[in-house]
Amino acid sequence: KFDAEDDSVFNNQSDSKSTNEELGSEISLASNNITNQDNINIDDRESIRALQIENYKKGDALLLNIHITHHAGTTFCAAMKQIGNTPSNACNGGDDWPETVPRHRPWEYDETDRNAIELRKVYHFISWEFGKKPRSPLVDVNWESPHLVSVIVMKDPIDRRLSGDGGINRMFGKEEERTEEQWEAFAKYDGSINFMLTRLTPDRCGTEGENTTEECLETGKELLRRFTYILDVKCLDEGLEALAGELGFSLPYLNKDSGKTQVSARERIGDDELYEFILRRNQRDFELYEWSKGLSLVNCSALEEELFDDDDDNNDIINNDDDFNDSAGNDGNVL
């Protein structure tokens, strides 16, 4: 698995300045064949999205997942590999990365177009995983580029905390084996406070825990508004299917259990006071996640309500069958 904190996959980088100069004239010609971005109001999200989607369908835009660690990046990558070419190493990079494109990420504003166009010649999808703070602010990327379709998967911050990995298990023990003292240390661990905001915002605000400002939250919202798509991990399968419909491809296989948590975070922690403590420390991340649902491609809450209504209808049918059985005879057969 690609380690977001290990940059060995991006070794032997090309010098970005010289590479971009070499590509300059070629990119200029390619841009002339695509609808002029100058005709778009950069504040008009829907117009920007429409052009990005159109260009992806024509093969002129790259699909990019902004992957916050433990936000279903492995599932997303596996699904996209079924559609077309992706980088070999967890969709982040690898030996097959084209030499004409620098390997650093995120990109600067002025290099977004040319890098996206060059990579689209090789891949239809790539991922940027951020386990640590990005080397340069994500706000500096040209997310309005007509050559880039951006996606971020959002997740409940406490569910993310409980996703666990080898490092967390070494520090606090496996979830099912944690002692009361280990759970308390887990809750007080500073490394995961407001994990989303500290990756999305340029000044890494959010580390203040429950003292994180409203301004920090609004900065995170501003960035999310610039992405082409937001998906909610709570109904990731339906989100990926909707994304496929928007971008004009079909998914031959989906893991129907992806993103679904059967047991709530509160139940998994098993201590209401500890749960509330973690929630307070990550309140701004929780608010960002709740707010993002309004921009999500699929409204998971509405989907749950539909499923609940369907279950009620099925129960009515079953109850009616029971009534029929009672009136018809021993086994429900009409005599």
Image: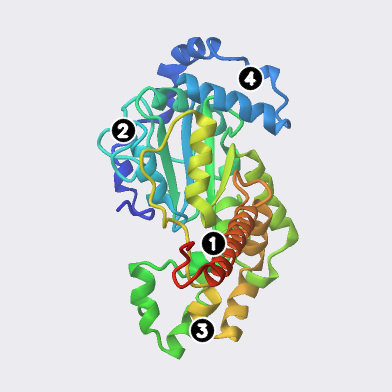
Amino acid residing under circle 2: Trp
Q: Nearer the viewer, residue 242 or 183?
A: 242
Total numbered circles: 4
Q: How far apart are marks 1 and 2 (CA)?
A: 29 Å
**Rounded to the nearest whole Å, what is the CA distance between mark 3 and mark 2?**
45 Å
To which residue does mark 2 refer? 97
Residue 180 is situated, as x and y percent measured from the top left of the image, at 46, 90
Q: How crowded is mark 1: few (under 14 residues within 10 Å), some or many (20 or more)?
A: many
Residue behind mark 3: 270
Disc 2 vs disc 4: Cβ atoms closer than 8 Å? no
Q: Which of marks 3 and 2 is nearer the N terminus?
A: 2
Judging by the rendered image, the residue that carries numbered circle 4 is 37
- Colour style of the rendered protein structure: rainbow
Taking the image as shown, residue 278 lies to the left or right of residue 74, namely right
What residue is drawn where x is 60% and y is 15%?
35
Q: Nearer the viewer, mark 3 or mark 2?
A: 3
Distance (Cα) linking label 3 and label 4 = 52 Å
Find numbered disc 3 in the image and state the secondary structure of the residue it sits on: loop
Q: What element carries label 2?
A: loop
Which residue is outermost to the front?
335
- Tell me which numbered mark, 4 or 1, is placed earlier along the sequence: 4
Q: Residues within 10 Å of mark 2 (few under 14, many from 20)?
A: many
**Residue 49 showing in the rendered view:** yes
Q: Which of marks 3 and 4 is in front?
A: 3
Q: Earlier in the sequence, mark 3 or mark 4?
A: 4
Residue carrying label 1: 195
Residue for point 55% across, 22% down? 54
Residue 218 left/right relative to 263: right
**Kind of residue indicated by mark 4:** Gln
The residue under the point 56% across, 44% down is 138
